[in-house]
Image: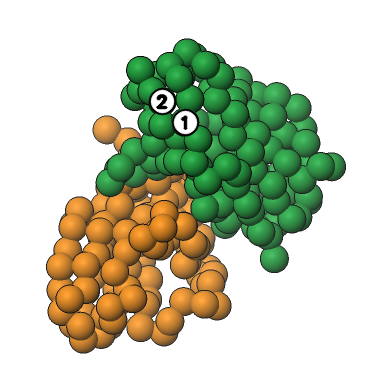
Chain colours: A orange, B green
């Protein structure tokens, strides 16, 4: 099956902990992204990564960092989570130029 | 910076009646427009991708793009209760950008 796979589906953690979410795509795409979806369903781009070029949305706090081992993987690490980080994090991939844009099913984070 | 707004916030239609959703954007140089559907606690399902002015049909879903008017719409023919979901409009951040800017969504409810 070719798709964008995210793990875990759901994660609960306490304020101050570090978390890491995994994303893998088997579509042969060369660009990957992380989006954050808040409680009002609003989606905002956090990072895009292509050919080792990382583009960061300037509003993303520094405790967030993407990690890539190859073009099929883009993980998301959050150092010292805060309550406002509770959201759904969606990973996506595409071909260069944005065609065939495909989303994973998301990781829901709850910070208590 | 690209801004995307959707209307209405919520829409209720009867099964079989046409449903029409609207999306306006601020930067008419964008060339990548998509409509997604998101069922509760699920990932994003792409419905229609459109890259030039005019009409694009995918099954019961038709998108109309008019970049001069900064407007893209989605029409759902013969909606069914299973079409009840949040519909999200996404526009590329600028011409050639890989990043998508999302509207805040329209909650569609289809009554049997």
x, y percentage for residue A57? 53, 72
Q: Residue furthest right?
A: B68
Does residue A83 appear anywhere in the picture? Answer: yes
x, y percentage for residue A92? 42, 51
Mark 2 / mark 1, whichever is N-terminal: 1
* Chain holding disc 2: B
Does residue A52 appear anywhere in the picture? Answer: no
Residue at 49% from the left image edge and 41% from the top image edge: B10
Q: Which residue is mark 1?
A: B12
Element type at mark 1: strand
| Category of crowding for the residue at label 1, using alpha-carbon neighbours closer than 10 angstroms: few (below 14), some (14–19), many (at least 20) | few
Evaluate if marks 2 and 1 touch, with contact meaning CB atoms under 8 Å apart: yes
x, y percentage for residue A76? 32, 68
Q: Which residue is mark 2?
A: B110
Residue at 47% from the left image edge and 66% from the top image edge: A47
Picture quarter with the C terminus of chain B: top left
Element type at mark 2: strand
* Chain holding disc 1: B
Instruction: In this rendered view, identify the residue nearer to me: B110 or A26.
Output: B110
């Amino acid at each position: 099956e070719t798709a964008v796979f995210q793990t875990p589906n759901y994660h609960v953690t306490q304020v101050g902990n570090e978390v890491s979410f995994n994303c893998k795509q088997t579509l042969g795409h060369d660009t990957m992204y992380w989006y954050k979806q808040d409680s009002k369903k609003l989606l905002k781009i956090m990072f895009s990564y292509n050919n080792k070029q990382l583009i960061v949305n300037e509003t993303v706090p520094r405790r967030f960092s993407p990690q890539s081992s190859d073009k099929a993987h883009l993980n998301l690490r959050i150092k010292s989570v805060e309550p406002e980080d509770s959201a759904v994090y969606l990973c996506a991939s595409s071909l260069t130029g944005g065609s065939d844009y495909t989303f994973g099913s998301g990781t829901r984070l709850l910070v208590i | 910076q690209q801004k995307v707004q959707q209307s209405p916030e919520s829409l209720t239609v009867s099964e079989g009646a046409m449903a029409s959703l609207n999306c306006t954007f601020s930067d008419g140089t964008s060339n990548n427009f998509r409509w997604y559907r998101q069922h509760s606690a699920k990932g994003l399902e792409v419905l229609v991708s459109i890259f030039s002015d005019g009409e694009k049909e995918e099954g019961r879903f038709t998108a109309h793009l008019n970049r001069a008017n900064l407007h893209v719409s989605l029409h759902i023919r013969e909606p069914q209760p299973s079409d009840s979901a949040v519909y999200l409009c996404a526009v590329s951040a600028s011409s050639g950008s890989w990043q998508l800017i999302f509207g805040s969504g329209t909650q569609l409810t289809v009554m049997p």
